[in-house]
Image (tube, grey):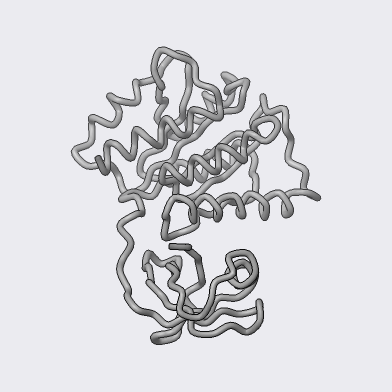
Amino acid sequence: MPRFFVRQERVNGRAISIIGEDAHHIARSLRMAVGDEITVCDMQGNEYTCRISAFDEDREVRAEILEVRHSQNEPKIFIRLFQALPKGDKLDTIIQKAVECGVSEIIPFQSERCVVKIKNDAEDRKTERRQRISAEAAKQCGRSVIPEVRASVGFEEAIAMAVESELCLFCYEGDGTLPLGSILRKYDQLPESVSIVIGSEGGFSQNEVAKAVDKGVTLAGLGKRILRTETASGFVLACLVCASEL
C-alpha cells in the first residue's frame, strides 16, 4: 500500500489532507482514484489506513481514516549518525542505507581529511536534496518517521553535539579502541540515545582523536577489516539494531 507522510496539523478528526508533491504523485503518477486505500504517517509514530475520499485536481487529496495504530517499525533507541563528508555521491547512499537501518537523525560534518568542503552558498540546496533522499528511503522501507538530515557542521560542533547522547561511539581504526561488541555487551539494555561518529575516506587525524577523547567519546573498533566510509555507518547501525531489537 502506498505510504505518505504528513504533519500532525493535516490530521483533522477522521480525515487527513495531503498537499504538495505527494498530492500530485497520488493523482498524476500513481493515478489513484476515490476509494483507493493508502497509508499515512503523521511523523509522531502513528500510522493511518485511509481511503481516498476526494481530489482537488492535483493540489490536495483528502482521505477518510479507517484505522489508527502506533507504528512498530521505529527503532527502540534514538540513533544519531555524524558522518564526515565523503567524496562524490557516497553521502546519498549513506543516507539511504542509514534510514533503512533505523537511524533517527543524520548530521554531516567536515573533518581535517575531508576532500569535500562545506560551501555555505550551496548548503541549503544540498540539505534539501539530502532530506528528499531520506524521505524516499523512509517510504520505501516502511518507516513512520522521516529521519532529519541536518545542515553540515564543523568537526568540533559535531563532537559537541554527539556527546549529548548517552553513548557516543567514535569509530576509529587506531590504538586505544574497544571492540564494538565488547562495548555493547556492557549494557543489559542499550541507552535510549546513541551517537555514531564516522570519518571520511582518510579517517581522523591524531589531533581530532585527542579532541574527541577529551570531550568524552568512546573509541570504538569495528573489527579486523578496514571498512569504507560508506560501509561503516550501516555496519554499526546493524549492530545496534541487533542488540536492541533482535
In which quadrant of the rendered image does the N terminus lie?
A: bottom left
Q: Is residue 180 above or below residue 24?
A: above
Tell me the residue at 39%/17% (across/down): 223
Outermost residue, right side = 121
Q: Is residue 10 above or below residue 233?
A: below
139 left or right of 25?
A: left
Tell me the residue at 45%/41% (across/down): 163
76 left or right of 8?
A: left
| Nearest the eye: 101 or 76 | 101
- Tell me where residue 49 sits by quadrant: bottom left
Tell me the residue at 51%/70% (across/down): 6
Please state the horizontal and vertical placement of residue 188, each as a whole percent of the image: 18, 38
Q: Is residue 88 above or below residue 42?
A: above
In which quadrant of the rendered image does the C terminus lie?
A: top left
- Tell me where residue 154 sits by quadrant: top right
Please state the horizontal and vertical placement of residue 145, each as a whole percent of the image: 45, 59
Q: Is residue 21 above or below residue 130?
A: below
Please state the horizontal and vertical placement of residue 27, each as a whole percent of the image: 61, 72
- Tell me where residue 29 sits by quadrant: bottom right
Q: How many marks?
A: 0
226 left or right of 190?
A: right
| Nearest the eye: 25 or 240 | 25
Please state the horizontal and vertical placement of residue 45, each as a whole percent of the image: 37, 64
Tell me the residue at 63%/49% (across/down): 130
